[in-house]
DNA sequence: ACCTGCCGCGCC
DNA sequence: AAAGGGCGCGGCAGGT
């Protein structure tokens, strides 16, 4: 059963069963939606709605979780971009304006970031530009009436059925939609967070909390040390420009204030400066102000944006949830009587690459062990570090340095895997799309990219124009090279999580609903964190072992679902702990 | 008083 | 040690 949900007059909501041809819409008040949805959920429907980030929190606030949905915004964005699902012209005209609001493929900073003088004002990414009809009027996905929802769902169904690999596309859309449910649930549940532990970390690193507008004591001491070592009493360490000038005046020949460059110099100012920068970073990114803004009732509730990046990885908006520094992870602490099951997929991307390319030699090097050790054992390189640098170089497109020199050795040992990423890079250099395992395609290069190529083919093009065009083309090739691996790995992770979520939902709550005041998250294991290839489940102690089994079996299931019989494995590093900090290694 | 670009750095 | 992919965020600098 599939039930479409749309907006109706005033504060009302309209529902219809898409699998009952004779059904007419049912219109109810928004306040009645959770109870009506709870009744319908018993039949295990797929909820078809515009935007999970709008609709699902309404249900979650009332304590209702749903099993399945189809998120039209997210799925529309995938179908829009996919080379596997090219739209016929007439379908393109039916594409509603509100779909443009999807978090979508505009993201890449390539080409603008690496071309400071080219580009100019970037009107490159005004999404949906020519397509949408009067944007403002119908841009709000939460206001789309039921007939609009049904029409768009039917259009997406047609595109999926007509796509190059309908089974893969269906799986991708289901996984993406499950991700949207998980994102909303994780926000509702929150990541358990100890303010006390966090404050102790801040005090240990920075000293006592300063008065508003003052620097922490420890930073002030470090700053004085740096200034005297530089022999310049008034330099402001927070200003890159001033600091760079001061370093050079002191005879330290650097081109930037980046820490990797500072590391290369030997001078009494360097050590305190690096310590100062470390402290400044902690203070501004995860200091007391962050605690005040983001931690309430012992929970961190970031705003996840599933599908928020071009490759399908998630993003977050606010709180920096995907960049939690290792040093503050000790503040992630399970509730009393509960545990954290922390699991990450070891070396996910190289394994995904081996499977994508059907490279049995590489899969064998990975199987049942550390893939980097396997590469050393294959005699490809001498050390584990070399293997790691070589693999990363192959996936990211390194051409110089140690990494670039080692890549050719990999190519001899694992020709199929290398051919796959090389082909992806070549495709990107031509300005064409590449596509992940399940059918998410890379965006086309931005206008500035085409402008650079066009300039180089003018009759009066200079050698510098040509160099520029080649460089821009290669930049895009590195993006597409990595896209197929990163994007396919994101699909694996989504399938892993979706399977795990389904299994966790079957665990009976420790206290039955009738005796519970709070949401189900207070009584059963649930996902609380997701970071590209890593998850955390918060669980009552008595379920921790069972959760660990479910996490492992879900990973195995994801591998089979995506890569069938191909002999690649996806081992997990898994730990049952009280604190996230205890899960390292 | 804003806005935008860029840097630097945290994570994968 | 070095520079290759994806992000978000805070802060500064320079613009309007």
Image: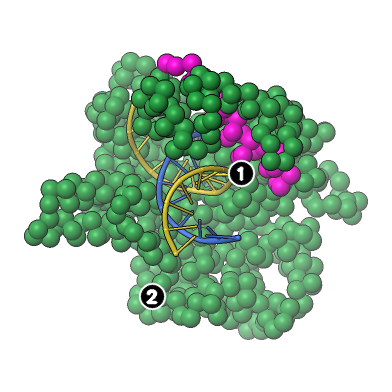
Chain colours: A green, B blue, C yellow
User: What residue is pinned by disc 2?
Assistant: A130
In the rendering, at what x and y percent does residue A99 appear?
Answer: 50, 70
Mark 1 — residue?
Answer: A321
Mark 2, residues whose alpha carbon is within 10 Å: few (<14), some, or many (≥20)?
Answer: few
Q: Which residues are magenta?
A: A266-295
Residue A145 vs residue A517: left or right? Answer: left
Residue drawn 38% across and 75% down?
A: A130
Mark 1 or mark 2: whose residue is earlier in sequence = 2
| Residue sitting farthest toward the right | A515
* A488 drawn magenta: no
The relative height of residue C1 versus residue A487 in the rendered view (above or below) is above
Q: Give the dominant element type of the magenta stretch: helix, strand or loop.
A: helix
To which quarter of the image does residue A22 belong? bottom right
Q: Nearer the viewer, residue A222 or A52?
A: A222
Task: Please indicate, yes or no, whether residue A549 appears anywhere in the rendered image.
Answer: no
- Which chain does tag 2 point to? A
For the point 56% across and 54% down, which residue is it? A306
Q: Eyeballing the image, is A341 above or below A168?
A: above
Are tags 1 and 2 found on a single chain? yes
Which quarter of the rendered picture does the N terminus of chain A lie within?
bottom right
Q: Is residue A6 visible?
A: yes
Is the residue A499 above or below the residue A242 in the image? below
Query: Neighbour class for label 1 at 10 Å: few (<14), some, many (≥20)?
Result: some
Q: Position of residue A181 (x, y in %)?
A: 63, 56
């Amino acid at each position: 059963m599939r039930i479409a949900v749309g907006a109706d007059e005033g504060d009302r909501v309209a529902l219809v069963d898409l699998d009952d041809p004779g059904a007419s819409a049912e219109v109810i008040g928004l306040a009645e939606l959770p109870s009506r949805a709870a009744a319908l959920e018993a039949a295990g429907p797929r909820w078809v709605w515009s935007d999970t980030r709008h609709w699902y929190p309404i249900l979650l606030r009332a304590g209702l979780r749903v099993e399945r949905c189809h998120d039209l915004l997210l799925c529309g964005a995938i179908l829009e971009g996919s080379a596997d699902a090219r739209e016929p012209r007439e379908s393109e005209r039916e594409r509603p304006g509100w779909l443009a609001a999807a978090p979508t493929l505009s993201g890449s900073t390539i080409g603008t970031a690496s071309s400071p003088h080219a580009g100019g004002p970037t009107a490159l990414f005004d999404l949906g530009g020519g397509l949408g009809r009067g944007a403002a009027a119908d841009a709000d996905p939460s206001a789309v009436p039921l007939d609009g929802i049904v029409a768009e769902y039917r259009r997406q169904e047609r595109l999926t059925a007509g796509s190059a690999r309908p089974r893969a596309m269906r799986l991708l859309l289901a996984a993406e939609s499950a991700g949207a449910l998980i994102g909303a649930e994780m926000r509702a549940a929150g990541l358990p967070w100890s303010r006390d532990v966090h404050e102790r970390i801040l005090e240990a690193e920075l000293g006592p909390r300063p008065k508003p507008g003052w620097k922490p004591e420890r930073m002030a001491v470090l700053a004085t040390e740096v200034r005297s070592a530089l022999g310049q009493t008034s330099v402001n360490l927070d200003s890159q420009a001033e600091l760079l000038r001061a370093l050079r005046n002191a005879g330290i020949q650097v081109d930037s204030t980046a820490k990797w460059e500072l590391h290369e110099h030997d001078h009494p100012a360097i050590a305190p400066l690096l310590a100062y920068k470390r402290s400044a970073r902690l203070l501004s990114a995860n200091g007391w102000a962050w605690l005040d803004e983001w931690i309430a009732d012992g929970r961190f509730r970031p705003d996840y944006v599933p599908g928020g990046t071009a490759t399908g990885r998630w993003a977050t908006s606010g709180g920096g949830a995907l960049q939690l520094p290792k040093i503050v992870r000790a503040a992630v602490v399970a509730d009393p009587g509960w545990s954290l099951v922390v699991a990450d997929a070891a070396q996910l991307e190289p394994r995904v690459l081996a499977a994508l390319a059907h490279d049995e030699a590489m899969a064998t090097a990975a199987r049942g062990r550390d893939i980097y050790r396997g590469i050393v054992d294959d005699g490809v390189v001498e050390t584990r570090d070399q293997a790691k640098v070589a693999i990363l170089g192959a996936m990211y497109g390194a051409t110089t340095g140690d990494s670039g020199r080692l890549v050719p050795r990999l190519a001899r040992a694992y020709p199929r895997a290398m051919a796959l990423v090389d082909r992806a890079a070549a495709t990107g250099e031509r300005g064409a799309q590449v596509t992940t395992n399940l059918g998410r395609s890379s965006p086309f290069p931005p206008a500035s990219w085409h402008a650079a190529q066009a300039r180089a083919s003018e009759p009066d093009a200079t050698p510098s124009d040509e160099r520029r065009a080649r460089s821009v083309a290669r930049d895009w090739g590195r993006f597409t090279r990595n896209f197929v691996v990163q994007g396919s790995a994101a699909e694996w992770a989504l399938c892993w999580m979706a399977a795990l979520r389904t299994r966790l939902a079957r665990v009976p709550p420790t206290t039955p609903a009738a005796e519970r005041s709070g949401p189900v998250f207070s009584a059963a294991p649930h996902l609380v964190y997701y970071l590209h290839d890593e998850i955390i489940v918060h669980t009552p102690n008595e379920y921790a072992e069972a959760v660990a089994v479910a996490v492992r079996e879900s990973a195995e299931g994801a591998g089979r679902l995506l890569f069938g019989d191909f002999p690649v494995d996806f081992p997990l590093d898994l730990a049952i702990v009280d604190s996230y900090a205890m899960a390292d290694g």
